[in-house]
Each structure stands twice: as C-alpha cells, then as structure tokens.
Image (cartoon, rainbow, N blue to C red):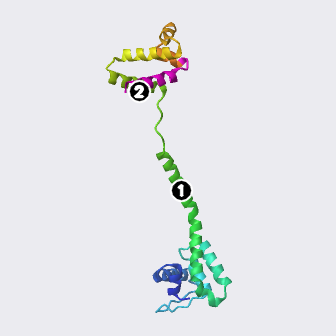
C-alpha cells in the first residue's frame, strides 16, 4: 500500500499520513522498524507498516484494531480491495464512540424542550373572583362594594344559605367564610356566570 492509498483509505491528506510516518519513525528511532519515504509516493507499506503508522495516527485504538483484524483475516492480495469495508468499519467505530455523546445531547435537548412546554399557572378561585368582579364593575359601572353584595346575594339564592350573616356571626370576611366552608369554587363559578350574563 502506498502513502497515497493510505491517505485515501483513512480520508486524510498525504501530508497527514507522512506526518504519521515521521511520528512513527521518531518513536522507533533506535530500531530497524523505520519506514523510509520515497519521492513520488511509491513507498510500499506492508500490512505491519500500516498497522504501526495507524497506531500513532489520530484514529482511535478500537478503529485501528478493527481495521487491522479485518485486513489480516483476508488474503494479502485482497487487502487493497477492501477500502470500502474498512471505511464502513471506521464509520461504525466513530459512530459507537460518539453514541454516548449524542445520547447526552438528546437528553439535554429534551429537557430544554420540556422547560419550553411549561404552562402558565392556573388562577385559583380567589383570583377568578377578583378578575370577574373587576370585569363586572367595568361593564356595569357598579361600585365594587355593590358588585360583591350582588355576588353574595346570588350565591345565597343558589345555595340556600346566607354567607353574609354566617361570616358576620364568625367575625370573618364573607370570602374567607366561603373559603373555610369549602364553597369558594362555587362562588367563583357564580362570579364567572354573572359576567357572562351581562355580555
């Protein structure tokens, strides 16, 4: 395999492969394992040379191991033909390495989307009553006092009780009495209905 073929195979430039070879040679300075680069890129690399170069490359150890195991399992004459298979294996190795990162990013994205989906808090019954009375007063021109008196009278007609008298006997505000008796939701529903009637 030539430097050019190795560059095409790894998807890197010839210059990068040459730097890998130089890095390999620096690591094996006192051994006979140096790879000589010839001009014209005609350097023929054996399968062992390719493995040594890839081990000092930027490829992961797993990718190199997979590539070399695949290359050695085929007859030598077919090694050059299996660039596509080896390329796919590199892709799989990279994909496996990136899978946990992608999964974490997906979780962060889901959390952000959940935060964006938050709904505004619902109004409680007292807020509904206040809003309804404000709207009632603005449409009828009635005073707030008279609007509340009208609401409590309507409540008494519908529930057959007198919240004004009961609240007075307990020395409470009428709305607090209704709340303590668990009738605040009924009072809110009546307030909403009163506003609808004047529309």
Q: Is residue 66 above or below residue 189?
A: below
Quadrant location of the C terminus in the rendered image: top left
Most foreground residue, 34 or 111: 111
Identified at 46% across, 82% down, the residue is: 15
Query: Measured from the top left, where is residue 29 in percent x and y?
Result: 56, 83
Query: Measured from the top left, where is residue 155 in percent x and y?
Result: 48, 17
Query: Measured from the top left, where is residue 46 in percent x and y?
Result: 60, 88
Tell which residue pokes out farthest to the left in this image.
141
Which residue position is annotated with label 2?
196
Which residue position is annotated with label 1?
106
In the displayed structure image, the side of residue 168 where residue 63 appears, left or right: right
Magenta stretch in the rendered image? 180-199
Tell which residue pokes out farthest to the top in this image.
169
- Whole-number angstrom distance, CA of label 1 to CA of label 2: 47 Å
Q: Is residue 43 above or below residue 132?
A: below
Quadrant location of the N terminus in the rendered image: bottom right
The numbered mark, 1 or 2, whose residue comes first in the sequence reads 1
Most foreground residue, 37 or 148: 148
Q: Is residue 31 visible?
A: no
Q: Is residue 72 visible?
A: yes
Q: Secondary structure at mark 2?
A: helix
Which class describes the residues within 10 Å of circle 1: few (<14), some (14-19), or many (20+)?
A: few
Magenta: main secondary structure: helix
Which class describes the residues within 10 Å of circle 2: few (<14), some (14-19), or many (20+)?
A: few
């Amino acid at each position: 395999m030539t430097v050019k073929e190795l560059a095409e195979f790894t998807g890197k430039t010839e210059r990068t492969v040459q730097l890998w070879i130089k890095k390999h040679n620096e690591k094996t300075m006192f051994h006979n394992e140096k790879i000589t680069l010839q001009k014209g890129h005609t350097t023929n690399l054996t399968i062992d040379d390719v493995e040594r170069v890839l081990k000092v490359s930027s490829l992961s150890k797993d990718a190199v191991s997979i590539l070399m195991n695949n290359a050695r399992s085929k007859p030598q004459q077919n090694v050059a033909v299996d660039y596509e298979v080896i390329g796919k294996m590199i892709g799989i190795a990279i994909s496996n390495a990136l899978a946990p990162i992608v999964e974490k990013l997906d979780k962060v994205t889901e959390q952000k989307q959940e935060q964006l989906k938050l709904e505004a808090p619902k109004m409680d019954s007292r807020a509904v009553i206040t809003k309804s009375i404000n709207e009632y007063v603005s449409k009828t021109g009635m005073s707030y006092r008279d609007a509340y008196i009208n609401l409590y009278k309507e409540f008494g007609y519908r529930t057959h009780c007198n919240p004004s008298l009961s609240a007075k006997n307990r020395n409470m505000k009428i709305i607090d009495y209704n709340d303590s008796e668990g009738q605040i939701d009924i009072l809110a529903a009546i307030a909403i209905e009163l506003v609808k009637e004047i529309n």
